[in-house]
Image (tube, grey):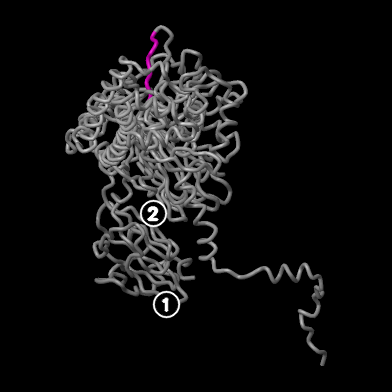
Amino acid sequence: MAKKKNPDESKPKVNNPNVMGLKAAVQEQAITDTLETNFMPYAMSVILSRAIPEIDGFKPSHRKLLYTMYKMGLLTGARTKSANIVGQTMRLNPHGDGPIYETMVRLSKGYGALLHPFVDSKGNFGKVYSRDMAYAASRYTEAKLAPICQELFRDLDQDAVDFVDNYDNTMKEPSLLPTTFPNILVSANQGIAVGMASQLCGFNLAEVCDATVAFLKNPDCALADILKGPDFPTGGEFLYDQAALEEVYRTGKGSLRLRGKYRYLKSENLIEIYEIPYTTTTEAVIDKVAELIKAGKLREVSDMRDETDLNGLKLAVDLKRGVDPDKLMAKLFRSTTLQDSVSCNFNVLVGGMPRVMGVRELLEEWCAWRTECVRRRVFFSLGKKKEKLHLLQGLERILLDIDKAIAIIRETESEADVVPNLMIGFGIDAVQAEYVAEIRLRNINKEYILKRVAERDALEKEISDLEDLLNSPARVKKVMIGELEAVKKKYAQPRRTAIVYEHEIESYDESEETPDYPVTVFLSRHGYFKKITPQSLRMADTQKYKEDDGLRVSMEAANRAEVMFFTNRQQVYKCRLSDFEDTKASVLGDYLPSKLGMEDGESVVDMVLPGDYSGAMLFFFENGKAARVELSAYATTSNRRRLTGAYSGKSPLAALIHLKEERELVLFSTEPRALIFHTALLAPKSTRTTQGVQVMTLKPKYHLSEVKAPEETSITNLPRYRCRAIPAAGALIREEDGDQMRLL
């Protein structure tokens, strides 16, 4: 018997020392250890140093760019090339020039993403409302800081915030910018981190300042009465929903609705859309309108084009004759992103920890942080004044006997001994003695002495006032209120996003625009659907099908009626009969898997006209179980076209029946057996995916084959097959009660 060959023996032996060393270097490591050592530091870096804004309203990339521009003197100086700014920013931001320039673009006045841009730009910076309008390269554009940036850097040189090392420890940068107003609520911001995201919508500066002042005076004030709602640079209209707005203010999460603005030009019979929601673009709107026109769902529009120019955004919609512009816009609001939702997720870093906060909590954190900034600024100013007072106190001692001071200086042989001799002669410290020694001879006069004495008295009063300010929280609040009122007076702008209340919104019933008339619908076994008018049926009623196809079901209905198509993938597709074109009996009709966008391999098993969603759906499975689900479980408030989990997928579906009233049904098995039971024995289930209850008990090799009404069968002896309770096995079908095919 031949010896079995070891598979390892056929492999060539590796004697290369480099390969052997590589194998030795490779070590097994638990996936949890790999995540902890490799992924977690990256995730923390993205959360803390990139994607989530901090309490000053800026991400690190924003802060580094603005601080670089401030150090370049661009707050008061002339504009410089954007490429120059980008290059200087790379000393603080260890990224490429592309991301840095994109950050500048978003902060710029030209791009228009912020209510109060921080970068005064010149050149093509693109537009926030356009997807395809690209910004020019950094070598072509110029920029400087906008005037409002004075409120970002006013206290920066007075120790109001901490400074930290940059990425290579060669220079310092501020950890936060001491904004004098709650920029976190004024400037829209969004970011996606690892495992979390942040999306802050902007509010009107004047309203934010008023709300902050009211909060400082009374933390329990009604913020919703002052902060009317978000304000967006692209304008549009905010559809006021008090419950949704209060939810956002309370939790920091929610969704708010926006829509565009338009005007109707009667002389040209066209609509001009001149403001769109902040969350969409002109290209997205035009693409959707073109799609609707192509699908035949927007017959009122003859053309739509983008006429945006130097005067601003403008989308022109040419109307056909006799079209009501308001009804058309209501339809566009429903069908396109001209009406859109903006998601709110007020996730902010506070003390290095991400927190989702409502507006009140955000104001509370900002006020606490700004209070600390003001106190640090006051403390810094107090220290400077105390230092100066200390110098003047030393000068005062010298001035009491100026002749003695002159004599000490004249009689000192070495210059280095002047300061020590003055310290000994007048009992002052080295700082005071140095200050005195630097006084010029021309200043040793009566006028100079009187000025210094008066200055000392003023300093003492200022120091006393600053110490009182530090010890008085009420006075600190008063300082903050004064700063907020000054910011509002200087930089406030009218609201750009109008507020539209519910009673001001005109609603149009889309079904009223759709003509209603009787139709007959046909569904074939292969999924072809036809909708035919009675007039067309009277002319020709012979239906055309493919060779191996035939009629599954036909029903009479109205054109506005809703229809549901159940599929073999436990899904139901909902639409209206008006979505289908009227056709003739001589055509195949619409192939539903293509028309409804079904998945590969998905096919229609039955059609139901729900009407007013009364009654129930009965699902019979091959394992003999049946589930009763109220039809109302399939009703939806939104225009959802597909519902998943329409019924249970544990066993193949044998039949489904729309039950409008209680009645008897006949169940047939492949044994063959028949069972007649009353549908009242089936209790309704609360979930659509219920497996149901056993109705017909089956032997292992048989299954439930079909379900019919008694009058649809050839059974003559009905009592033989009836049952009083379920489950039941049924009775074997006699020859006189069934056709020959069923006995096979």
Let me know if residue 416 is in the magenta part: no
> Can I make out residue 293 in this image?
no
Residue 195 placement, left or right of 404: right
Write down the residue under mark 2. 646
Could you tell me residue 545's position as x and y percent? 54, 45
Let me know if residue 262 is in the magenta part: yes
Write down the residue under mark 1. 699
- Residue plotted at (54% across, 32% down): 102
Residue 176 placement, left or right of 468: right
Depth order, front residue of 479/32: 479
Residue 76 placement, left or right of 225: right
Q: Residue furthest front?
A: 411
**The quadrant where residue 210 appears:** top left
Q: Residue furthest bottom?
A: 1
The residue under label 2 is which amino acid type?
Ala
Could you tell me residue 704's position as x and y percent? 42, 67
Quadrant location, the N terminus: bottom right
Q: Secondary structure at mark 1?
A: loop
Give the answer, above or below, for where 674 lies relative to 152: below
Label 1 Cα crowd, 10 Å radius (few <14 / some 14-19 / many 20+): few
Q: Earlier in the sequence, mark 1 or mark 2?
A: 2
The residue under label 1 is which amino acid type?
Lys
Depth order, front residue of 709/374: 374
- Residue plotted at (25% across, 53% down): 661
Q: Disc 1 and disc 2: Cα gap in Å?
A: 28 Å
Which stretch appears magenta? Answer: 260-266
- Name the dominant secondary structure of the magenta segment: strand
Could you tell me residue 23's position as x and y percent? 71, 70
The nearer-to-camera label among 1 and 2 is: 2
